[in-house]
Image (cartoon, coloured by chain):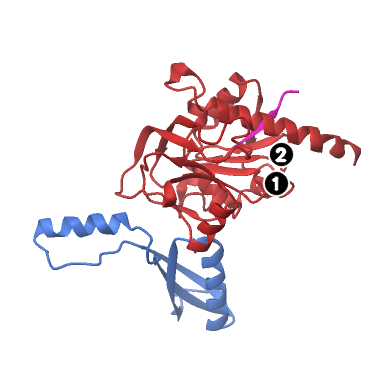
Chain colours: A blue, B red
Amino acid sequence: MARFTVRIDVTHKPGILDPQGAQVERALPALGWSNVSQVEVGKSIHLVVEAESEAAARAQVDEMCARLLTNPVLEEYTAEIELAPAEEGAA
Amino acid sequence: MTARVGIVVFPGSNCEMDVAWAVETLGGEPQLLFHDEENLRGVDTVVLPGGFAHGDYLRTGAIARFSPVMDAVKEFAAAGGPVVGICNGFQVLTEAGLLPGALQKNAGLRFVCDTVDLRVETATTSLTLEATAGDVLRIPINHFEGNYVCDAETLARLRGDDRIVVRYVDNPNGSLDDIAGICSEGRNVVGLMPHPERACEPVLGSGDGAVMIRSLLAAASDWAEREQPRAAVS
Protein backbone atom coordinates (compact mmCIF):
# COMPACT_ATOMS: atom_id res chain seq x y z
CA MET A 1 0.00 0.00 0.00
CA ALA A 2 1.13 3.52 -0.70
CA ARG A 3 -0.08 6.89 0.53
CA PHE A 4 -1.21 9.46 -2.01
CA THR A 5 -1.91 13.11 -1.39
CA VAL A 6 -4.97 14.32 -3.23
CA ARG A 7 -5.95 17.90 -4.04
CA ILE A 8 -9.44 18.21 -5.46
CA ASP A 9 -10.39 21.49 -7.06
CA VAL A 10 -14.16 21.94 -7.20
CA THR A 11 -15.59 24.57 -9.54
CA HIS A 12 -19.04 25.48 -10.84
CA LYS A 13 -20.25 23.85 -14.02
CA PRO A 14 -20.69 26.22 -16.95
CA GLY A 15 -24.04 27.93 -16.60
CA ILE A 16 -24.20 27.54 -12.82
CA LEU A 17 -24.19 30.85 -10.98
CA ASP A 18 -21.12 31.78 -8.99
CA PRO A 19 -22.42 34.76 -7.04
CA GLN A 20 -19.30 34.86 -4.85
CA GLY A 21 -17.05 35.08 -7.90
CA ALA A 22 -19.28 37.75 -9.42
CA GLN A 23 -19.20 39.77 -6.20
CA VAL A 24 -15.41 39.55 -5.93
CA GLU A 25 -15.10 40.55 -9.58
CA ARG A 26 -17.18 43.64 -8.87
CA ALA A 27 -15.13 44.48 -5.78
CA LEU A 28 -11.64 44.27 -7.32
CA PRO A 29 -11.97 47.35 -9.54
CA ALA A 30 -12.82 49.36 -6.42
CA LEU A 31 -9.23 48.74 -5.31
CA GLY A 32 -7.85 49.74 -8.68
CA TRP A 33 -7.59 46.36 -10.38
CA SER A 34 -9.85 46.96 -13.32
CA ASN A 35 -8.06 44.44 -15.57
CA VAL A 36 -9.44 41.32 -13.85
CA SER A 37 -12.17 39.13 -15.30
CA GLN A 38 -13.55 35.60 -15.07
CA VAL A 39 -13.21 35.45 -11.30
CA GLU A 40 -14.47 32.19 -9.91
CA VAL A 41 -14.66 31.14 -6.27
CA GLY A 42 -14.67 27.37 -5.89
CA LYS A 43 -13.42 25.08 -3.18
CA SER A 44 -10.40 22.95 -2.60
CA ILE A 45 -10.48 19.63 -0.76
CA HIS A 46 -7.21 18.04 0.39
CA LEU A 47 -6.90 14.49 1.65
CA VAL A 48 -4.59 11.52 1.84
CA VAL A 49 -5.68 8.11 0.59
CA GLU A 50 -4.00 4.75 1.01
CA ALA A 51 -4.20 2.66 -2.13
CA GLU A 52 -2.42 -0.02 -4.12
CA SER A 53 -1.64 2.28 -7.00
CA GLU A 54 -2.24 5.78 -8.30
CA ALA A 55 -4.90 4.37 -10.63
CA ALA A 56 -6.70 2.78 -7.68
CA ALA A 57 -6.44 6.06 -5.75
CA ARG A 58 -7.90 7.96 -8.71
CA ALA A 59 -10.77 5.52 -9.11
CA GLN A 60 -11.62 5.96 -5.44
CA VAL A 61 -11.37 9.75 -5.64
CA ASP A 62 -13.72 9.75 -8.64
CA GLU A 63 -16.22 7.69 -6.71
CA MET A 64 -15.94 9.87 -3.59
CA CYS A 65 -16.51 12.96 -5.74
CA ALA A 66 -19.54 11.41 -7.41
CA ARG A 67 -21.14 10.25 -4.17
CA LEU A 68 -20.28 12.93 -1.65
CA LEU A 69 -17.61 15.52 -2.36
CA THR A 70 -19.31 17.18 -5.31
CA ASN A 71 -22.83 17.55 -6.65
CA PRO A 72 -22.63 16.66 -10.35
CA VAL A 73 -25.67 18.83 -11.11
CA LEU A 74 -23.82 21.95 -9.96
CA GLU A 75 -20.13 21.23 -9.85
CA GLU A 76 -17.18 19.76 -11.71
CA TYR A 77 -13.73 18.96 -10.38
CA THR A 78 -10.16 18.11 -11.16
CA ALA A 79 -7.99 16.00 -8.87
CA GLU A 80 -4.22 16.07 -8.57
CA ILE A 81 -2.86 12.87 -7.07
CA GLU A 82 0.75 12.42 -5.96
CA LEU A 83 2.69 9.84 -4.01
CA ALA A 84 2.90 11.21 -0.46
CA PRO A 85 6.37 11.99 0.93
CA ALA A 86 7.41 9.61 3.72
CA GLU A 87 6.12 10.91 7.04
CA GLU A 88 8.79 12.34 9.32
CA GLY A 89 9.16 10.30 12.48
CA ALA A 90 6.74 7.68 11.22
CA ALA A 91 7.25 4.34 12.90
CA MET B 1 -58.41 8.70 11.72
CA THR B 2 -55.65 11.01 12.86
CA ALA B 3 -52.73 11.19 10.47
CA ARG B 4 -49.37 10.60 12.15
CA VAL B 5 -46.75 12.93 10.72
CA GLY B 6 -43.09 12.03 11.20
CA ILE B 7 -40.85 15.10 11.29
CA VAL B 8 -37.17 14.33 10.82
CA VAL B 9 -34.79 16.23 13.09
CA PHE B 10 -31.22 16.48 11.85
CA PRO B 11 -28.54 18.22 13.89
CA GLY B 12 -29.14 21.80 12.74
CA SER B 13 -32.80 21.46 11.75
CA ASN B 14 -34.71 24.44 13.12
CA CYS B 15 -38.24 24.34 11.70
CA GLU B 16 -39.39 21.04 13.17
CA MET B 17 -41.52 22.66 15.86
CA ASP B 18 -43.15 24.98 13.31
CA VAL B 19 -44.17 21.90 11.34
CA ALA B 20 -45.34 20.12 14.49
CA TRP B 21 -47.43 23.15 15.49
CA ALA B 22 -49.06 23.40 12.05
CA VAL B 23 -49.79 19.66 11.97
CA GLU B 24 -51.32 19.71 15.43
CA THR B 25 -53.34 22.86 14.74
CA LEU B 26 -54.82 21.21 11.65
CA GLY B 27 -55.72 17.97 13.38
CA GLY B 28 -52.72 15.72 12.75
CA GLU B 29 -50.42 14.04 15.25
CA PRO B 30 -46.76 15.11 15.00
CA GLN B 31 -44.00 12.65 15.81
CA LEU B 32 -40.39 13.84 15.85
CA LEU B 33 -37.98 11.32 14.29
CA PHE B 34 -34.27 11.73 14.97
CA HIS B 35 -31.62 11.50 12.29
CA ASP B 36 -30.05 8.37 13.76
CA GLU B 37 -33.27 6.34 13.94
CA GLU B 38 -33.48 3.41 11.59
CA ASN B 39 -37.24 3.10 11.36
CA LEU B 40 -40.06 5.57 11.02
CA ARG B 41 -42.15 4.32 13.99
CA GLY B 42 -45.10 3.59 11.73
CA VAL B 43 -45.87 7.20 10.77
CA ASP B 44 -48.17 7.88 7.81
CA THR B 45 -46.09 10.61 6.21
CA VAL B 46 -42.62 12.12 6.62
CA VAL B 47 -41.64 15.79 6.58
CA LEU B 48 -38.02 16.95 6.25
CA PRO B 49 -38.17 20.41 7.81
CA GLY B 50 -36.12 23.54 7.19
CA GLY B 51 -32.91 24.50 8.89
CA PHE B 52 -29.24 23.83 8.38
CA ALA B 53 -28.91 20.06 8.63
CA HIS B 54 -25.37 19.12 9.66
CA GLY B 55 -24.43 22.78 9.43
CA ASP B 56 -24.90 22.67 5.65
CA TYR B 57 -21.25 21.62 5.60
CA LEU B 58 -19.83 20.73 2.18
CA ARG B 59 -23.15 21.61 0.52
CA THR B 60 -26.70 22.03 1.78
CA GLY B 61 -28.17 18.60 2.43
CA ALA B 62 -24.98 16.77 1.42
CA ILE B 63 -24.24 15.17 4.79
CA ALA B 64 -27.85 14.82 5.94
CA ARG B 65 -28.61 12.39 3.15
CA PHE B 66 -26.32 9.81 4.80
CA SER B 67 -28.19 9.88 8.12
CA PRO B 68 -29.50 6.43 9.08
CA VAL B 69 -33.09 7.70 9.01
CA MET B 70 -32.73 8.56 5.31
CA ASP B 71 -32.57 4.88 4.32
CA ALA B 72 -35.96 4.39 5.95
CA VAL B 73 -37.28 7.56 4.29
CA LYS B 74 -36.09 6.30 0.88
CA GLU B 75 -37.80 2.97 1.43
CA PHE B 76 -41.01 4.69 2.53
CA ALA B 77 -40.90 6.97 -0.53
CA ALA B 78 -40.23 4.04 -2.87
CA ALA B 79 -43.29 2.27 -1.47
CA GLY B 80 -45.40 5.33 -2.33
CA GLY B 81 -45.55 6.97 1.11
CA PRO B 82 -46.04 10.74 1.15
CA VAL B 83 -42.78 12.63 1.83
CA VAL B 84 -42.38 16.40 1.85
CA GLY B 85 -39.14 18.37 2.07
CA ILE B 86 -39.47 22.02 2.99
CA CYS B 87 -36.57 24.42 2.25
CA ASN B 88 -33.49 22.64 3.63
CA GLY B 89 -35.59 19.46 3.45
CA PHE B 90 -36.00 20.03 -0.31
CA GLN B 91 -32.21 20.38 -0.58
CA VAL B 92 -31.79 17.09 1.29
CA LEU B 93 -34.26 15.35 -1.07
CA THR B 94 -32.30 16.48 -4.15
CA GLU B 95 -28.98 15.43 -2.62
CA ALA B 96 -30.50 12.07 -1.70
CA GLY B 97 -31.65 11.56 -5.29
CA LEU B 98 -35.34 11.43 -4.32
CA LEU B 99 -35.97 14.48 -6.47
CA PRO B 100 -33.98 15.58 -9.55
CA GLY B 101 -31.93 18.75 -9.94
CA ALA B 102 -30.32 20.89 -7.26
CA LEU B 103 -30.69 24.18 -5.42
CA GLN B 104 -27.94 26.67 -6.17
CA LYS B 105 -27.25 30.02 -4.55
CA ASN B 106 -29.80 32.72 -5.20
CA ALA B 107 -29.17 34.98 -8.17
CA GLY B 108 -27.68 38.19 -6.85
CA LEU B 109 -26.03 36.58 -3.83
CA ARG B 110 -28.93 37.60 -1.63
CA PHE B 111 -30.51 35.75 1.24
CA VAL B 112 -34.22 36.26 0.67
CA CYS B 113 -36.67 36.53 3.54
CA ASP B 114 -40.09 37.55 2.31
CA THR B 115 -43.67 36.44 1.81
CA VAL B 116 -44.37 35.66 -1.83
CA ASP B 117 -47.19 34.57 -4.13
CA LEU B 118 -47.04 30.93 -5.24
CA ARG B 119 -49.17 29.51 -8.01
CA VAL B 120 -50.37 25.94 -7.54
CA GLU B 121 -49.69 24.16 -10.84
CA THR B 122 -51.09 20.74 -10.07
CA ALA B 123 -53.50 19.41 -7.47
CA THR B 124 -52.48 15.77 -7.79
CA THR B 125 -49.52 15.66 -5.38
CA SER B 126 -49.39 14.84 -1.68
CA LEU B 127 -48.98 18.54 -0.87
CA THR B 128 -51.71 19.96 -3.10
CA LEU B 129 -54.56 17.41 -3.04
CA GLU B 130 -56.92 19.87 -1.40
CA ALA B 131 -55.87 22.86 -3.50
CA THR B 132 -56.92 23.74 -7.04
CA ALA B 133 -54.53 24.29 -9.92
CA GLY B 134 -54.30 28.04 -10.48
CA ASP B 135 -54.74 28.95 -6.80
CA VAL B 136 -52.33 31.67 -5.67
CA LEU B 137 -51.07 31.25 -2.11
CA ARG B 138 -49.18 33.76 0.06
CA ILE B 139 -46.32 31.78 1.63
CA PRO B 140 -43.08 32.86 3.36
CA ILE B 141 -39.65 32.10 1.91
CA ASN B 142 -36.41 32.23 3.82
CA HIS B 143 -33.33 30.92 2.03
CA PHE B 144 -29.97 31.54 0.42
CA GLU B 145 -29.77 28.43 -1.79
CA GLY B 146 -33.23 28.27 -3.33
CA ASN B 147 -32.41 28.79 -6.99
CA TYR B 148 -33.61 25.56 -8.59
CA VAL B 149 -31.52 24.23 -11.47
CA CYS B 150 -31.52 21.06 -13.57
CA ASP B 151 -30.48 20.07 -17.08
CA ALA B 152 -32.72 20.71 -20.08
CA GLU B 153 -33.77 17.07 -20.32
CA THR B 154 -34.89 16.97 -16.69
CA LEU B 155 -36.80 20.22 -17.09
CA ALA B 156 -38.60 18.86 -20.16
CA ARG B 157 -39.54 15.75 -18.19
CA LEU B 158 -40.76 17.78 -15.19
CA ARG B 159 -42.93 19.91 -17.49
CA GLY B 160 -44.16 17.01 -19.62
CA ASP B 161 -45.18 14.93 -16.61
CA ASP B 162 -46.80 17.89 -14.82
CA ARG B 163 -44.33 17.58 -11.95
CA ILE B 164 -43.82 21.30 -11.26
CA VAL B 165 -46.01 21.63 -8.17
CA VAL B 166 -45.72 25.35 -7.38
CA ARG B 167 -44.21 28.31 -9.25
CA TYR B 168 -43.28 31.77 -8.01
CA VAL B 169 -45.56 34.43 -9.46
CA ASP B 170 -42.65 36.89 -9.20
CA ASN B 171 -39.36 34.95 -9.20
CA PRO B 172 -37.36 36.02 -6.11
CA ASN B 173 -34.18 33.96 -6.54
CA GLY B 174 -33.49 33.22 -10.21
CA SER B 175 -35.03 29.75 -10.04
CA LEU B 176 -35.27 27.96 -13.40
CA ASP B 177 -38.74 28.27 -14.94
CA ASP B 178 -39.90 30.05 -11.72
CA ILE B 179 -39.90 26.65 -9.98
CA ALA B 180 -40.65 26.78 -6.26
CA GLY B 181 -41.45 23.09 -5.81
CA ILE B 182 -41.50 19.81 -7.72
CA CYS B 183 -42.64 16.25 -7.16
CA SER B 184 -41.40 12.75 -7.88
CA GLU B 185 -42.66 10.54 -10.69
CA GLY B 186 -45.04 8.87 -8.26
CA ARG B 187 -46.22 12.36 -7.11
CA ASN B 188 -45.85 11.26 -3.47
CA VAL B 189 -42.49 12.99 -2.82
CA VAL B 190 -42.67 16.79 -2.93
CA GLY B 191 -39.93 19.34 -2.31
CA LEU B 192 -40.43 23.08 -2.10
CA MET B 193 -38.46 26.08 -0.87
CA PRO B 194 -41.37 28.07 0.65
CA HIS B 195 -42.61 27.36 4.18
CA PRO B 196 -46.34 26.53 4.22
CA GLU B 197 -46.09 25.50 7.89
CA ARG B 198 -45.41 29.12 8.81
CA ALA B 199 -48.57 30.33 7.12
CA CYS B 200 -51.31 28.20 8.64
CA GLU B 201 -53.05 30.84 10.71
CA PRO B 202 -54.12 34.34 9.67
CA VAL B 203 -52.52 35.73 12.85
CA LEU B 204 -49.14 34.75 11.36
CA GLY B 205 -49.76 36.96 8.32
CA SER B 206 -51.26 34.30 6.05
CA GLY B 207 -53.37 31.21 6.44
CA ASP B 208 -52.73 30.09 2.89
CA GLY B 209 -50.27 27.34 3.83
CA ALA B 210 -53.00 25.45 5.68
CA VAL B 211 -54.34 23.96 2.44
CA MET B 212 -50.93 22.36 1.84
CA ILE B 213 -50.64 20.89 5.34
CA ARG B 214 -54.27 19.70 5.12
CA SER B 215 -53.41 18.07 1.78
CA LEU B 216 -50.51 16.27 3.39
CA LEU B 217 -52.73 15.06 6.25
CA ALA B 218 -55.24 13.77 3.67
CA ALA B 219 -52.47 12.04 1.69
CA ALA B 220 -51.18 10.51 4.92
CA SER B 221 -54.64 9.21 5.85
CA ASP B 222 -55.12 7.77 2.34
CA TRP B 223 -51.74 6.07 2.62
CA ALA B 224 -52.54 4.67 6.06
CA GLU B 225 -55.86 3.27 4.90
CA ARG B 226 -54.22 1.61 1.94
CA GLU B 227 -51.03 0.38 3.58
CA GLN B 228 -51.51 -0.15 7.31
CA PRO B 229 -54.02 -3.02 6.96
CA ARG B 230 -51.59 -4.77 4.65
CA ALA B 231 -48.75 -4.22 7.13
CA ALA B 232 -50.92 -5.63 9.92
CA VAL B 233 -51.54 -8.81 7.92
CA SER B 234 -47.94 -9.49 6.98
Q: Residue furthest front?
A: B134
Is residue B35 depicted above or below A19 in this figure?
A: above
* In this picture, residue B92 sits left or right of residue B204: right
What chain does mark 1 sit on?
B
- Label 2 close to label 1 by CB (< 8 Å): yes
Residue drawn at x 45%, y 16% is B203
User: In the drawing, what numbered circle is on residue B213?
Assistant: none
User: Which residue shows up at 67% across the image and 45% down it?
Assistant: B73
**Disc 2 secondary structure class:** loop
| Place of residue B87 in the rendered image (x, y in percent of width and height, measured from the top left) | 49, 41
Quadrant where the N terminus of chain B is found in the figure: top right
As drawn, B2 above or below B12: above
Please provide percent x and percent y for residue A78: 42, 73
What's the amino acid at mark 2? Leu
Total numbered labels: 2
In the image, is B51 to the left or to the right of A25? right
Q: Nearer the viewer, residue B61 or B86?
A: B86
> At x 48% / y 54%, what residue is drawn?
B102
Question: Does B173 sit above or below residue B45?
Answer: below
Q: Is residue B16 visible?
A: yes
Q: For residue B40, which numbered disc appears in the image?
A: 2
Whole-angstrom CA distance, mark 2 to mark 1, is: 7 Å
Q: Secondary structure at mark 1?
A: helix
Instruction: Write down the region rendered in magenta.
Output: B1-8
Question: Residue at coordinates 37% horizontally, 43% vertically from top-left?
Answer: B171
Within 10 angstroms of label 1, few (less than 14), some, or many (20 or more) residues? some
Q: Indicate which disc residue B72 carries.
A: 1
